[in-house]
Image: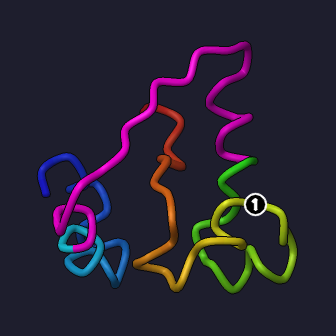
Amino acid sequence: SEFFEVYDGVVNEFHAIVDEFTSGPALVLEIRAEEAVSSFRKFAGPWDVNFAKELYPSTLRARFGKNRVENAVHCTDLETE
């Protein structure tokens, strides 16, 4: 949970998210491109799956996310990461 500690006390689902992230295998990607971070964030969509489905239905989270914990993909929304 150390990697995600910045969200502890900020995101209500913090412990459930850490449990989800550590519950099984993961696919890790390194994306190299101009504007890679902002492009991937746009492709992933909003963290809240319901919001993503309503406003950005073609994003990864809208298409494959189940809820705010099982939202299909992790990419940080923090500019420093």
Q: Is mark 1 on a helix, strand or loop?
A: loop
Q: Is residue 13 left or right of residue 68?
A: left
Residue at figure coordinates x 65%, y 53% from the top left: 44
* Image quarter hosting the C terminus: top left
Residue 80 pos. (x, y %): 45, 31
Q: How crowded is mark 1: few (under 14 residues within 10 Å), some or many (20 or more)?
A: some
The furthest residue to the left: 2
Looking at the rendering, the stretch of residues picked out in magenta corresponds to 20-42
Q: Which colour scheme is used?
A: rainbow
Identify whether 42 is placed above or below 34.
below
The answer to which of 67 and 9 lies nearer the viewer is 67
Q: Is the magenta stretch mostly helix, strand or loop?
A: loop
- Is residue 27 covered in magenta? yes
Residue at figure coordinates x 63%, y 67% from the top left: 61
**Quadrant of residue 74 within the rendered picture:** bottom left
Residue at figure coordinates x 20%, y 46% from the top left: 3
Residue 77 pos. (x, y %): 54, 49
Residue at figure coordinates x 67%, y 65% from the top left: 46
Q: In this view, does 29 lie to the left or right of 62?
A: left
- Is residue 67 covered in magenta? no
The answer to which of 79 and 26 lies nearer the viewer is 26
Question: How many discs appear?
Answer: 1
Residue beneath label 1, please?
Answer: 59
**Quadrant of residue 32 within the rendered picture:** top right
Identify whether 79 is placed above or below 73.
above
Residue 60 pos. (x, y %): 67, 60
* Image quarter hosting the N terminus: bottom left
**Quadrant of residue 8 within the rendered picture:** bottom left
Amino acid under disc 1: Thr
Residue 49 pos. (x, y %): 63, 79
